[in-house]
């Protein structure tokens, strides 16, 4: 396994209740860098089975008559770590048939020039039978951060790590090793802080707990490379953090609880692939696919800062996510249901309360340059947005505006020519300097547009092909040719209400009414329809009348 169950537990979590369940084994430790300081994080735990963020160097020579030997596990770790751009170090010895990795450490580079080093002490690879190797760790490991600079104080954060019924094993054959970690409970808690070797009074406390941990990870041979398969599941995840600073009159508490968390991912890795090499990202045949789920989420923040008190709460229902990334394309599909937000504070005039029934986002974007058009998709749904009466009362205390749930739907697809590989940072910078777009749209289809707010509803569909004569409006590129059909209800009533509430002047409303009269036709009471066409000569026609 290329990372410890601790690392998997930490990095597989979504960044919010709305996304990021597809985040996998990319090291979240990169977020631990402190500018101008060296940080050492020490983990202490009473049990023997834990896990590491990496593995390390020389192979022991003692033979083991088994289909899967400890040396095979160690070789697999070294190879996989190198593929991620990590540098392992260790000294190896044997204890009977057990392979011992002494002074095990791995260095992980960061883009800002800093380096994270994971020191695991001694790791033991113990053969259980012909197919299983048990992985054992010491009761402590350290995380040290080396910033890009010489004169930096050291800081140490100490954590206690406790587990119940843990088991971490490697199984399979030398060229197809799978790893499994299970535990009833896993708890990581902050227990101390050290600065330059001296204890510091605790101004923070925190813990991270996982219930029903079940993590599997394996590699399988594939044509020209291998396939990495990972599954991370927890019955529940709980996080708590308290921060205090008496000098700044600050006391903040943060809590997070998640239920039924799951993440399954597959990565295709060609032989010799190095993720830290930009050229390989743009040319190699690699790919990453992930599916995630989250049953429910609760996030709470409260406390005092700069003399002001506040409280914030977020509650969400089921969440699903599917993501894929390769040198060819990026796709992302997330759906979040039942979002409830509330916030109060001494500097907030009224409580802020709102709900959204559904939030969904679907994106498909081609990445590799090609002379042929490639398909893209962008779809966003915000359905059933409601605000509390207290918020409405700030602008409409009398209830003049309809307070029905608001909706926003944008569903687009089409095709475009990708001018340069979007993963090639140097090529993107060159295009930006030249003022050239990275993509040239060829077709755009508006499958659905819907905006419903305060009683007014705008809907539309349309399609365009970029085949017209270049014009100033199209920046010298072919102009769009096609049409869009729009339907608008309740707009005049909304304008009347905004005028009555003093939110819009009569002259501003008059200008809007004149524009609607120019572009649309009345087909009923406060009901307008319009067909906007764009011709190959660059003309704009509204309901059969040329307006440009």
Image (cartoon, grey):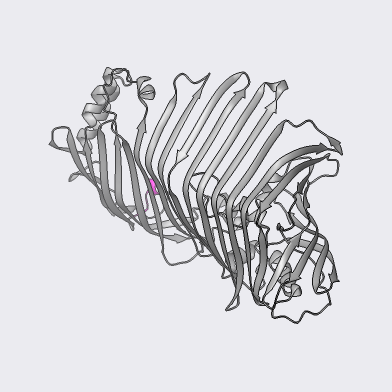
The residue located at (13%, 33%) in the rendering is 525
Q: Which residues are magenta?
A: 469-474
Where is residue 280 drawn, in percent x and y?
63, 66
Q: In the figure, is residue 338 to the left or right of 457?
A: right
232 in the magenta segment:
no
Where is residue 416 drawn, in percent x and y?
42, 59
Where is residue 399 drawn, in percent x and y?
28, 21
The residue located at (30%, 19%) in the rendering is 505
Does 86 sit above or below residue 197? Answer: below
Residue at the outermost left position: 524
Residue at the outermost front position: 165
Q: Quadrant of the N terminus?
A: bottom right
The residue located at (46%, 30%) in the rendering is 342
Q: In the figure, is residue 31 to the left or right of 369?
A: right
Does 442 sit above or below residue 144? Answer: below
Where is residue 226 drawn, in percent x and y?
60, 73
Is 123 or 475 nearer to us in this picture?
Answer: 123
């Amino acid at each position: 396994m290329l990372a410890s169950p601790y690392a998997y537990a930490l990095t597989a979590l979504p960044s919010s209740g709305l996304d990021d369940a597809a985040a996998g084994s990319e090291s979240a430790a990169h977020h631990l860098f402190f500018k101008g300081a060296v940080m050492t994080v020490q983990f202490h735990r009473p049990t023997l089975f834990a896990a590491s963020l990496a593995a390390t160097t020389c192979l022991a020579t003692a033979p083991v008559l088994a289909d899967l030997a400890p040396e095979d596990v160690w070789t697999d770790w070294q190879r996989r770590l190198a593929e991620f751009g990590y540098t392992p170090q260790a000294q190896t010895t044997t204890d009977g048939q057990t392979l011992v990795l002494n002074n095990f450490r791995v260095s992980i580079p960061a883009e800002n020039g800093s380096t994270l080093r994971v020191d695991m002490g001694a790791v033991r690879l113990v053969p259980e039978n012909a197919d299983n190797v048990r992985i054992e760790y010491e009761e402590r490991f350290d995380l040290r951060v080396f910033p890009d600079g010489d004169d930096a104080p050291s800081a140490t954060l100490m954590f206690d790590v406790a587990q119940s019924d843990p088991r971490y094993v490697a199984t399979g054959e030398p060229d197809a090793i799978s790893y499994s970690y299970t535990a009833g409970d896993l708890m990581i808690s902050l227990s101390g802080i050290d600065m330059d070797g001296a204890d510091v009074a605790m101004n923070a406390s925190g813990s991270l707990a996982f219930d029903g941990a079940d993590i599997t990870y394996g590699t399988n041979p594939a044509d020209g490379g291998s396939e990495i398969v990972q599954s991370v599941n927890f019955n529940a995840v709980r996080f708590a953090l308290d921060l205090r600073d008496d000098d700044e009159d600050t006391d903040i508490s943060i809590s997070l609880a998640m239920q039924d968390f799951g993440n399954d991912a597959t990565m295709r890795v060609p032989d010799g692939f190095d993720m830290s090499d930009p050229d390989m990202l743009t040319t190699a045949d690699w790919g990453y696919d992930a599916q995630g789920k989250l049953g429910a989420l609760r996030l709470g923040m409260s406390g005092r800062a700069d003399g002001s008190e506040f409280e914030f709460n977020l509650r969400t229902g089921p969440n699903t996510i599917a993501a894929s990334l390769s040198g060819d394309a990026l796709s992302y599909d997330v759906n979040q249901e039942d979002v409830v937000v509330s916030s109060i504070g001494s500097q907030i005039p009224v409580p802020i309360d709102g709900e959204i029934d559904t939030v969904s986002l679907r994106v498909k974007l081609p990445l590799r340059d090609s002379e042929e058009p490639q398909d893209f998709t962008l779809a966003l749904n915000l359905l059933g947005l409601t605000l509390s009466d207290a918020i409405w009362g700030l602008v409409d205390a009398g209830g003049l505006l309809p307070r029905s749930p608001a909706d926003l739907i944008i569903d687009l697809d089409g095709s475009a020519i990708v001018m340069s590989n979007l993963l090639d940072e140097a090529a993107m910078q060159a295009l930006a300097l030249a003022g050239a777009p990275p993509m040239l749209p060829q077709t755009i289809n508006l499958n659905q547009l819907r905006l419903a707010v305060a009683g007014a509803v705008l809907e539309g569909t349309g399609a365009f092909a970029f085949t017209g004569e270049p014009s100033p409006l199209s920046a010298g590129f072919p102009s769009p040719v096609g049409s869009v059909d729009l339907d608008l209800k309740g707009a005049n009533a909304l304008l009347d209400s905004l005028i009555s509430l003093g939110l819009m002047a009569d002259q501003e409303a008059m200008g809007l009414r004149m524009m609607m009269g120019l572009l649309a036709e009345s087909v009923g009471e406060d009901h307008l329809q319009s067909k906007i066409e764009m011709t190959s000569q660059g003309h704009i026609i509204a309901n059969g009348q040329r307006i440009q």
